[in-house]
Amino acid sequence: MHNPGNATPERFPAQDRFAQGAQFVEGRVTKGSSGRTHAVVDPATGAEVYTYELAGADDVDAAVAAAREAFPAWAGATPGERSDALHRFAAVVADRAEEFARAESLQCGKPLKLTREFDVPGTIDNIAYFAGAARSLQGQSAGEYSGDHTSYVRREPIGVVGSVAPWNYPLQMAAWKILPAIAAGNTIVLKPAELTPLTSLLFAQAATDAGIPDGVVNIVTGTGKEAGEHLVGHPDVAMTSFTGSTAVGKRVAEITTAGVKRLHLELGGKAPFVVFDDADLDAAVNGAVAGALINTGQDCTAATRAYVQRPLYEDFVERTAALMETVRLGDPFAPGTDLGPLISHAHRDRVAGFVDRARAYARVVTGGDAPLGELMNGAYYRPTLIADAAQDSEVVRSEIFGPVLVVLPFDTDDEGIALANDTPYGLAASAWSRDVYRTGRATREIKAGCVWINDHIPIISEMPHGGYRASGFGKDMSAYSFEEYTQIKHVMFDNTAVVRKDWHRTVFGDR
């Protein structure tokens, strides 16, 4: 059964664009061939808004073949030509910004103010950044490093990239995967999460409408087990980029390692939020609530473990709980809504399970339940603050991925930094202090790919995003992302015109 959508046009203005299915191959929307369907569910209401045919292995093969065919011409385009195409791409997405914002809010449950002011503008800025960066794919400058030769370094595209994106930021993750890949001259097949394919499809359509050639950007919407594993293991896929949980990332690594492919992983996180005793307490409280609750806490960089130096601890707990209680849950499309639902009822129940188990060993200061009344049909969960948990407890160690912040005290600066680093993850962190030496130490000693000072969450296109340890390796965004999506080639010219080189004697003859 194929149902293009039963949401109102106000909530889903672009639904007519999905009338032919949820796959995008060689510039066209098509149906999947797996024989199974999947429904996109509005997590705010529990209503099915779009039912589509899932991709199977044949769809993946077709998408990879299209990307492989498009690769020579796209890789051979000049940096200026690719840049111009990306500038047009940015203009198309900007023109359709409201469609993107509403589709993202519908499938994810994000408040419209988040999609309008964060997800969509951030994505447009990403496109504009890579439109410029496409002209700066530079290697090391030429030089005579041996004395007898001139060397230089070329950056070359890798080939077909097979990427897998998660459901928490579908539009931004599609951009983070697609943009550096194609700016560098690669072609790509992206598998979005089957829960949230709508904005990835709109993004690919916008690329085609902007004049990016057919086959450069392809979308296959299927399950991880069927479409995802077939994509990352495909013999014609030269590189895999995956964003998701650490557990699934390990499986992706197994498959790609067997095929000796380039691999980029952006995995889970458990970001510490370290508040020293000279911090501006009001700023830290506001930062903690915003950093913990953004996207309903479904953010791998969200503030999840607040370590507060003992003199500020009780006040921090009290004020943070009070501020959390002012956050307004509601319809994502309503103007007054601050916080939407979680992605699904199953995920809401998973988050609730962490909190319910924590009651046996910690104090749930506020939240810790689902709202009743008009929101009870959605996957809502109230902002939750947990205090007095032990460092080795489940809520401190595990990635909850919901609107839950755990607060623990510390005494010395050494202890605060040690607790921040006491995790298998290393994606993001923040430190709060008025003392430049304290904050400088935090930036040096906290083991994470991003350390904010007196703020938590902001990202910019010009700076890299990626983690340490179990949070993966490699970078999204910024010029550093080209390290993932290009191959480095050393070219060396003899400058002497000498037939018999001096070094030849090491193989035959004498000097």
Image (cartoon, rainbow, N blue to C red):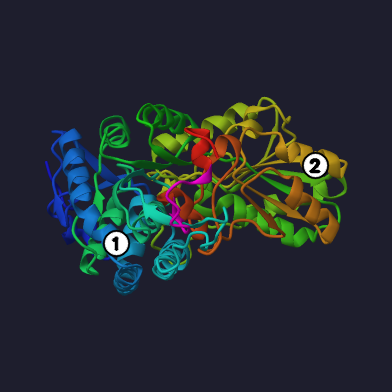
Q: Which residues are the magenta region?
A: 490-502
Q: Is residue 228 visible?
A: yes
Classify residue 395 as left or right of residue 191: right
Residue 189 appears at what percent x and percent y? Answer: 28, 47
Instruction: Identify which residue is drawn at 72% across, 32% down.
Output: 389
279 lies above or below 227: below
The residue tagged 2 is 416
Front in this rendered view, residue 287 or 202 = 202
Secondary structure of residue under mark 2: helix
Disc 2 marks which amino acid?
Gly
The residue tagged 1 is 11
Front in this rendered view, residue 27 or 408 = 27
Q: Quadrant of the C terminus?
A: top right
Secondary structure of residue under mark 1: loop
Disc 1 marks which amino acid?
Arg
Residue 472 appears at what percent x and percent y? Answer: 53, 39
Instruction: Identify which residue is drawn at 36% across, 42% down.
Output: 239
Front in this rendered view, residue 355 or 50 = 50
